[in-house]
Amino acid sequence: MTFRVDVITLFPEVVEHYAAATILGRAADKDVWRLRCHDPRDATHDVHRTVDDTPFGGGAGMVMKAEPLLATIRSVPDLPRPVVALTPSGRPLTHAVAREFAALEGVTLLCGRYEGIDQRVLDTEVDDEVSVGDFVLAGGELAALCLIEAVVRLRPGALGNDASVMEESFSDGLLEYPHYTKPAEVEGLVVPEILRSGDHARVARWRRAHSLRRTLQRRPDLLTEDALSDEDRRILAEFPDENPPAANG
Ligand code: ADE
């Protein structure tokens, strides 16, 4: 079934342009997903098409007004649920969260601009809030596109090869191992011999060792030494670190 994505945004052309390009555009051509954008300015009634105002309580910046957002949400009879607001205060977007959305029939993404969205919109019409990281973007559009791409590529038929989704980073909670393609030598840098050996079992062990080591070194929040299985310890010992971190002192 076609996955439905509705996006409420002041910049529909930005979202539509990216969504028509690359893998997302091809997936839309194949009816894997369908995008509709709604501009809250179209739900305003004043000559300036005002969508923001100053915050009660004072302070810098502007807040997105409730009425145009509520009117937009309520004007679309078949708006997909859940309605998800993109905001730095949301729950973090992870592969697991992308899978959660990919299992649904669709989703509506609400992009904020300015300092934030009037809380009454979040309280009444928003089902979920998602953040793409601990940094602040100028608006939710890039975050919405991150979510769309992470989700749509998990839908059947989105990629040429569904196996690549199964094998990739994070499906096993680890970072990716290094990848190489032809030629075997570039500027004196050669592809590790094992990868050219045709020994699939040994290639698999090499890859796991490198995934494990990368994850241990770069993302201790995902994996620590004490959580390693005996087999993973053996695999790591089999392929010693080629670039050990410099010793302190
Ligand atoms: N809007 C602004 N910053 C954001 C972030 N980090 N994640 C999601 N939406 C945002």
Image: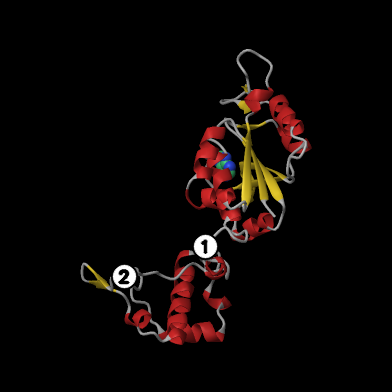
The residue carrying mark 2 is: 182
Q: Is residue 224 above or below residue 95?
A: below
Q: Is residue 63 above or below residue 219?
A: above
Tell me the element at label 2. Answer: loop
Q: Is residue 90 above or below residue 67?
A: below
The residue carrying mark 1 is: 160
In the rendering, at what x and y percent does residue 94 appear?
59, 57
In the rendering, at what x and y percent does residue 8 appear?
64, 35
**Displayed quadrant of residue 84:** top right
The answer to whether the residue bearing label 1 lies less than 8 angstroms from the nearest atom of ligand 1 is: no
Determine the quadrant in which ligand 1 lies.
top right
Residue at the spot 45% in from the left edge and 84% down from the top edge: 200
Is 120 on the left-hand or right-hand side of 25? right
> What type is the residue that disc 2 sits on?
Lys
Residue 137 or 165: which is nearer the viewer? 165
Instruction: Give neighbour class at mark 1: few <14, some 14-19, many 20+ (Cα, 10 Å).
Output: few
Gap in angstroms between the C-alphas marked 2 and 1: 21 Å
Residue at the spot 62% in from the left edge and 58% down from the top edge: 155
Residue at the spot 41% in from the left edge and 87% down from the top edge: 199
**Displayed quadrant of residue 245:** bottom left
In the rendering, at what x and y percent does residue 161 appear?
53, 66
Name of the residue lying farthest toward the front: 30
